[in-house]
Amino acid sequence: MGRQLNPLAIAVVAIMIAVTTVFTLAVRVPVPATNGYVNLSDVAIYFTAFAFGPWVGLIAGGVGTALADLLGGYAQFALLTLLAHGLEGFAAGWLGRDRNFMGMVGAWLAGAVVMCSLYLLGEGLVLTGWGPAFTELPFNAFQNLVGAVVGIPLVLAVRRAYPPLTHMLRRQAWREE
């Protein structure tokens, strides 16, 4: 018998995709040099990755932000966004889930490097050229900083208020026969 889908995991992933999409669309600051925008997506991505782990961070971070690009009129960025934010969520979740504050800061830094590097390469090679790509780099770094400054304390507060969050979406270590 193969693996069965966990209804709780499906619900959490769907909710976090929606939350990430809303955070991405709620506050958008245009960057005219690249025809892109800065947003609050990284708050949701880091919260999701640190609370639920790398796979939920990957799916919610990638799909949520790409969906926001499609809904918000930035379809040219959707594929790059799917990859950059998805891998950012995976890296942060892989390194930062179940960690303390400093562990999450290190994981955030890894996620920020992944996201900023992929946007730089994607924009430079395919979308806008190297000049606009380098112009947008500090904006992407700032967006990541805001994500960490809000997302890390938020996940720590939710862990304190709702301790079962730490064990949510974990496989059971035992089996009934």
Image (cartoon, grey):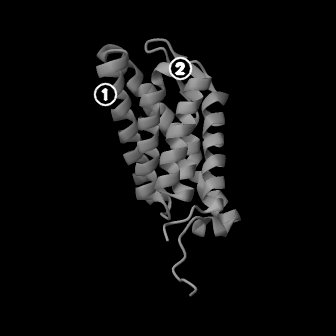
Which residue is denoted by mark 1 in the rendering? 121
Residue 135 in the image, given as x and y percentages of width and height:
38, 18
Residue 21's place in the image compared with 76, above or below, is: below
Q: Residues within 10 Å of mark 1 (few under 14, many from 20)?
A: some
Q: Looking at the image, which residue sits at the far right?
A: 161
Tell me, yes or no, if residue 134 can be seen here.
no
Residue 18's place in the image compared with 67, above or below, is: below
Residue 52, picture quadrant: bottom right
Q: Earlier in the sequence, mark 1 or mark 2?
A: 2
- Left or right: where 142 falls relative to 70: left
Which residue is painted at 46% across and 26% down in the image? 139
User: Is label 1 in contact with label 2 (beta carbons under 8 Å)?
Assistant: no
Secondary structure of the residue carrying tag 2 is: loop
- Left or right: where 13 falls relative to 110: right
What amino acid type should be assigned to the residue bearing mark 2? Answer: Tyr
Residue 3's place in the image compared with 62, above or below, is: below
- Left or right: where 21 falls relative to 134: right
Secondary structure of the residue carrying tag 1 is: helix
Residue 117 in the image, given as x and y percentages of width and height:
33, 34
Which residue is painted at 59% across and 29% down in the image? 68
Which residue is denoted by mark 2 in the rendering? 74
What amino acid type should be assigned to the residue bearing mark 1? Answer: Leu
